[in-house]
Image: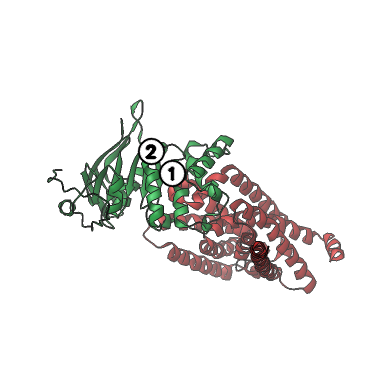
Chain colours: A green, B red
């Protein structure tokens, strides 16, 4: 089990506004981290810094290559698969499902080359694995929220990333879909580390291995059970939604 | 109509107009697809009107107005793209500023230009029949550049247009493609001014694509379909302009709008029929 990335003393934000302060985090292979926290607390910002979309003001994000130890910085794209919030895209854009999935191979491809038959087969096998093969020729505007999430998941994992990052995958979907989706993620977790952002703490704590509370600062909580008191001590003002079948262990006070 | 066509082919001005329609249709078909799918219609309108500043400068200093408009509008396009990202100004407000600034500059220079300013109305409303061989050579050069650019970068253009932020996570050359394409948008607009005029050229960049979009929801198909649609409308507009003796720019737009209405009605009828058919097919098994 190797280290994938390490964030040290990170400060980041937009323009003059610092959103993340003094954040440190290590992500290892097969980790499954749930990121929770209030709106505007910096959850998405953290993902964007890891993805290299936002440059940090201070501190660093270092990626570690499988074999040769430390790798150069900009190489994050082959390591990370990313599933953005689906409300960010233009649903009227004329693009087919199969093309969306193949766009997940952008950085593995030259700018000029066409897709090989092998890559198209790979896209199709992922679509069947997630039960959406029949949608491959549809335009994205014709899909439901749940179907779109699956297409996005295919795009995120087609490059076989070491780390999969998902931003609010449970918005716009029904409970049945949500359960299926998290089962799929649990399966994927055998092959890759996962970071999932959500404000539905109750649901994700059932699936994730560890929890990170992000509200300007980051507090890492090395189990998947968390109490209201602990959330308060992490300065993480969110409501704990309790679903019936989720075990809630009250832990001894945890030092961080 | 065919007799009229062959009769007109004898005239140099007509063959020039015809060639201009062909190349403007190719350029506008391709670039317009990018504009429409990426929702850049307003910025394109802004660039179009800003280019009038370049035309005024051309008249005043005695350059070819199309050449100075090309330079001026590429700079304006790059300016809008740059300042909307770097300066803390909303993009649409910035477009409004460039839009009126360019027009004002054009009016001042055209007013100050020594002597008579011929064809000024032609630049505003289009004048296909005054297309020069230089215009055509410039349009051919642009067609080659635009076509090569889209063939070489098709995948990247598609992915960046669809989801720019995701493309950034893959280290795609987002900035390069954005700047290059906005420059091509500016050049396409300026070199199509002779066909439809500053005030009307936006129609060539949006209506063919909207018509194509009625029949296909695929980026590549819209791009390819838009070219013949644009040419059909430009060509029929040209013939109408000649036979009724009305301004060509306006008749081209009329042709585009009517084609759109007919196409829209056609798809409505086809959809109704296919729904009817589907309902009938549903009923059959229950009867048997």
Which of the two labelled residues, at mark 2 and mark 1, occupies the earlier sequence position? 2
Q: Secondary structure at mark 2?
A: helix
Give the numbered dot on residue A76: 2
Residue under label 1, please give it: A156
The crowding category of the residue bearing disc 2, from other C-alpha atoms within 10 Å (few below 14, some 14 to 19, many at least 20), is: many
Horizontally, is B254 left or right of B39 in the view?
Answer: right
Pick the residue in front: B147 or B113. Answer: B147
- Of the 4 image quadrants, the one containing the N terminus of chain A is top left
Q: Is residue B265 above or below residue B181?
A: below
Residue displayed at 78% across by 69% down: B242
Which residue occupies 36% across, 39% down? A189
Q: Is residue B122 visible?
A: no
Q: Nearer the viewer, residue B243 or B232?
A: B232
- C-alpha distance separating marks 2 and 1: 13 Å
Classify B94 as above or below A178: below
Q: Chain of mark 2?
A: A
The image shows residue A9 at horizontal and vertical percentages of 22, 42
Quarter of the view holding residue B211: bottom right
- B15 left or right of A103 in image: right
Q: Position of residue A34 (x, y in %)?
A: 29, 47
The quadrant where residue B237 appears: bottom right
Does residue B15 show up?
Answer: yes
Identify which residue is drawn at 30% across, 55% down. A200
């Amino acid at each position: 089990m190797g280290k994938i990335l390490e964030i040290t003393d990170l400060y980041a934000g937009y323009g003059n506004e610092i959103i993340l302060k003094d954040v440190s985090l290590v992500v290892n292979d097969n980790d499954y981290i749930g990121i929770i926290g209030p709106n505007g607390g910096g959850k998405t910002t953290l993902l964007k810094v890891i993805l290299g979309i936002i440059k940090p003001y201070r501190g660093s994000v270092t990626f570690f290559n499988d074999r040769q130890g430390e790798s150069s910085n900009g190489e994050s794209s082959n390591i990370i698969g990313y599933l953005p919030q689906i409300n960010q895209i233009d649903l009227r854009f004329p693009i087919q499902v199969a093309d969306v999935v193949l766009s997940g191979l952008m950085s593995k491809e030259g700018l000029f080359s066409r897709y090989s038959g092998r890559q198209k087969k790979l896209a199709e096998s992922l679509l069947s694995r997630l039960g959406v093969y029949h949608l491959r020729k549809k335009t994205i505007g014709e899909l439901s929220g749940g179907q779109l999430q699956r297409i996005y998941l295919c795009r995120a994992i087609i490059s076989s990333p070491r780390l999969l990052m998902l931003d609010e995958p449970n918005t716009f979907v029904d409970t049945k879909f949500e359960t299926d989706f998290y089962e799929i993620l649990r399966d994927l977790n055998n092959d890759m580390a996962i970071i999932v952002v959500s404000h539905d703490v109750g649901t994700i704590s059932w699936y994730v291995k560890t929890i990170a509370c992000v509200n300007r600062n980051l507090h890492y909580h090395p189990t998947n059970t968390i109490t209201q008191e602990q959330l308060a001590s992490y300065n993480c003002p969110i409501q704990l939604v309790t679903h019936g079948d989720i075990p809630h262990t009250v832990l001894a006070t945890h030092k961080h | 109509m065919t007799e009229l066509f062959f009769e007109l082919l004898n005239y140099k001005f007509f063959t020039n107009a015809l060639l201009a329609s062909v190349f403007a249709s190719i350029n506008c078909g391709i670039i317009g697809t990018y504009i429409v799918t990426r929702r850049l219609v307003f910025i394109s309108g802004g660039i179009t009107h800003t280019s009038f500043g370049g035309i005024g400068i051309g008249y005043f200093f005695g350059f070819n107005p199309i050449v100075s408009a090309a330079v001026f509008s590429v700079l304006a396009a790059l300016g809008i793209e740059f300042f909307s990202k770097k300066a803390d100004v909303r993009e649409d407000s910035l477009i409004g500023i460039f839009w009126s600034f360019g027009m004002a500059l054009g009016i001042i220079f055209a007013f100050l230009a020594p002597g008579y300013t011929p064809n000024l109305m032609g630049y505003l409303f289009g004048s296909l029949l005054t297309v020069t061989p230089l215009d055509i050579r410039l349009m051919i050069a642009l067609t080659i550049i635009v076509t090569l650019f889209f063939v070489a970068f098709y995948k990247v253009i598609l992915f960046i247009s669809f989801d720019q932020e995701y493309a950034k996570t893959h280290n795609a050359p987002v900035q390069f493609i954005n700047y290059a394409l906005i420059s091509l948008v500016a050049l396409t607009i300026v070199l199509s001014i002779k066909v439809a005029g500053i005030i009307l050229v936006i129609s060539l960049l949006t209506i063919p694509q909207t018509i194509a979009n009625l029949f296909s929801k695929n980026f590549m198909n819209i791009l390819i379909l838009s070219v013949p649609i644009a040419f059909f409308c430009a060509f029929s507009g040209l013939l109408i302009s000649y036979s009724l003796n009305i301004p060509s720019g306006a008749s081209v737009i009329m042709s585009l709008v009517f084609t759109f209405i007919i196409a829209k009605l056609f798809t409505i009828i086809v959809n109704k029929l296919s729904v009817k058919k589907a309902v009938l097919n549903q009923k059959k098994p229950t009867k048997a």
